[in-house]
Image: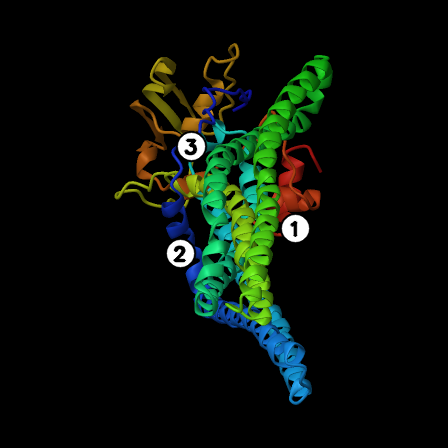
């Protein structure tokens, strides 16, 4: 049976569903959970490094009061060695947290990519008919890579920044409540600025991921169909369409990066403001004897320790938003129902003689435009039949139904007198071979491609098949 391949059906839209960050994070945990022991070890190192990072400035402040202000030298060398030990341990803890977190991240995205690829093979053909291949490829490559980069750095950064923030707050309160209040003056400004920025970047990053997926899909489509593009001299139109999609991506990326770029500028301004306030008010308090010089040194450093985590959290927040947008696109594929299970009474078959019968078959890809209405015909074993008709007449649809990529809405298809729905799909397809108009060759030799449908075939059987197809 020779059938011309034709496209059909409306393509699904690319509209974004409502974002659910908490739900997405919970679902991502199912992929991370197998690595929870190593994740716990990495988090332990994060806690350790955060504590050591807080200890260093405190020791420096005490040293200023003991050895510089008091002009003493006894114990100075021991304090210096202790300080060096703190920073050496900080370096080791930081290395271990990064090493273990990268391992967790790579194992997690490895599992996600494998499961997603496996899920692709379990989806119905109708899913691929209505999606751009490049857009799907973007999800398994760009979106997962985006998640990988976030796992590598953002998780530990968020934990470290949070712990540093809380630890710095506790130590500052214990040293001077007045200077702590001065340091906290910038927090409402930070909160207001961050709220204004993130409300805009969240939507922009999601739009950026959508536009990137669309452009990748278009490029893949044009490259795959390059012969058709050249045949009909559509190069200029394709270039214009790419320019339009590229402009959409540029616009979305411009505003996403512009808004997120406000964050470091805002944080630098507030850091400098905090430093100026602490230096000025702290100097006045020191002159009155309310605080020591060492305390001011500690506060200046802790003010940076306090605002820097806020800065890091702000920067990582944008990265996290972008990764969550990609994660939602990946999870959307997992949410797509698999191909319907075989009917309970369906059985595998050992042999097909080749009699095919369509009885009053009715089928439509969508309810408004039926593709087949009341189709009835039969083909005997060994008989050659050609289906002829204009594009959209239903030639490819007959093949889609015969292979059970789709099932009829009404009527039935019989194979050797048996309803095709009582035959397991995999078993039915193992007894069929197709030569479609659009030939696709997988990487490897011609022999490998001929053997693709039955990997256990011997070289002699491959050569026999090639002779029968006049391809030897």
For disc 3, the marked residue is 405
For disc 2, the marked residue is 30
Most extreme residue toward the front is 288
Q: Which residue is mark 1?
A: 459
- CA distance for labels 1 and 3: 30 Å
Residue 233, above or below 269 = above
**Tag 2's secondary structure?**
helix
Q: Is residue 194 left or right of residue 373?
A: right
Return the x and y of residue 267 as percentages of the image width and height: 58, 46
Residue 389 is left or right of residue 98, and the answer is left
Kindly indicate whether the residue at mark 3 contacts the one at mark 1 (C-beta within 8 angstroms): no
The Cα atoms of the two marked residues, 1 and 2, are separated by: 45 Å
In this rendering, would 165 be left or right of 243?
A: left
In-front residue for pair 57/147 = 57
In the picture, the quarter occupied by the C terminus is top right
Q: Nearer the viewer, residue 200 or 139?
A: 200
Which image quarter: residue 255? Answer: top right
> Which percent across, then down, holds residue 53?
57, 69
Local secondary structure at mark 1: helix
Quick check: 91 above or below 243? below
Please identify, in this view, whether the residue under mark 1 or under mark 2 is nearer the observer. 2
- Which of marks 2 and 1 precedes in the sequence? 2
- Residue at (38% x, 39% y) in the render: 339
Q: Residue at x 61, y 50 (%)?
A: 272
Q: Nearer the viewer, mark 1 or mark 3?
A: 3
Tell me which numbered mark, 1 or 3, is placed earlier along the sequence: 3
């Amino acid at each position: 049976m020779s059938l011309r391949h034709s496209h059909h059906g409306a393509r699904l839209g690319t509209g974004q569903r409502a974002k659910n960050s908490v739900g997405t994070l919970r679902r991502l945990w199912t992929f991370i959970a197998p690595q929870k022991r190593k994740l716990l070890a990495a988090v332990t190192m994060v806690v350790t490094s955060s504590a050591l990072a807080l200890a260093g400035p405190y020791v420096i402040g005490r040293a200023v009061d003991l050895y510089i202000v008091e002009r003493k030298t006894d114990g100075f060398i021991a304090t210096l060695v202790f300080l060096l030990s703190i920073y050496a341990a900080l370096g080791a803890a930081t290395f271990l947290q990064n090493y273990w977190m990268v391992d967790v991240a790579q194992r997690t995205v490895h599992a996600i990519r494998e499961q997603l690829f496996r899920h692709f093979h379990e989806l119905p053909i109708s899913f691929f008919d209505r999606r751009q291949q490049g857009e799907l490829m973007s999800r398994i490559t760009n979106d997962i890579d985006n998640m990988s980069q976030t796992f590598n750095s953002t998780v530990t950064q968020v934990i470290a920044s949070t712990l540093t923030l809380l630890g710095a707050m506790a130590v500052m309160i214990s040293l001077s409540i007045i200077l702590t209040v001065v340091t906290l003056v910038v927090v409402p400004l930070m909160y207001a600025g961050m709220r204004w920025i993130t409300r805009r970047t969240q939507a922009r990053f999601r739009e950026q991921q959508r536009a990137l997926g669309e452009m990748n899909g278009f490029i893949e489509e044009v490259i795959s169909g390059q012969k058709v593009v050249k045949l009909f001299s559509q190069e200029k139109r394709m270039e214009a369409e790419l320019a339009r999609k590229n402009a959409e991506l540029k616009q979305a990326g411009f505003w996403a990066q512009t808004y997120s770029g406000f964050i470091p500028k805002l944080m630098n301004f507030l850091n400098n403001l905090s430093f100026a306030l602490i230096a000025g008010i702290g100097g006045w308090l020191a002159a009155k004897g309310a605080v020591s010089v060492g305390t001011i040194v500690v506060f200046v450093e802790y003010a940076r320790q306090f605002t820097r985590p806020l800065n890091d959290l702000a920067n990582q927040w944008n990265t996290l938003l972008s990764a969550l947008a990609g994660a939602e696109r990946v999870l959307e594929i997992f949410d797509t129902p698999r191909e319907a299970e075989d009917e309970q009474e369906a059985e595998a078959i050992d042999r097909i003689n080749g009699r095919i019968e369509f009885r009053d078959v009715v089928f439509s890809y969508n309810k408004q435009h039926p593709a087949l209405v009341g189709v009835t015909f039969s083909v005997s074993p060994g008989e050659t039949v050609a289906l002829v008709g204009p594009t959209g007449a239903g030639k490819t649809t007959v093949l889609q139904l015969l292979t059970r990529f789709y099932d009829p809405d009404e009527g039935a298809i019989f194979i050797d007198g048996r309803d095709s729905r009582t035959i397991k799909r995999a078993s039915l397809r193992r007894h069929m071979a197709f030569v479609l108009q659009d030939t696709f060759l997988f990487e490897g030799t011609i022999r490998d491609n001929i053997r693709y449908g039955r990997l256990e075939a011997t070289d002699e059987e491959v050569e026999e098949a090639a002779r029968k197809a006049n391809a030897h």
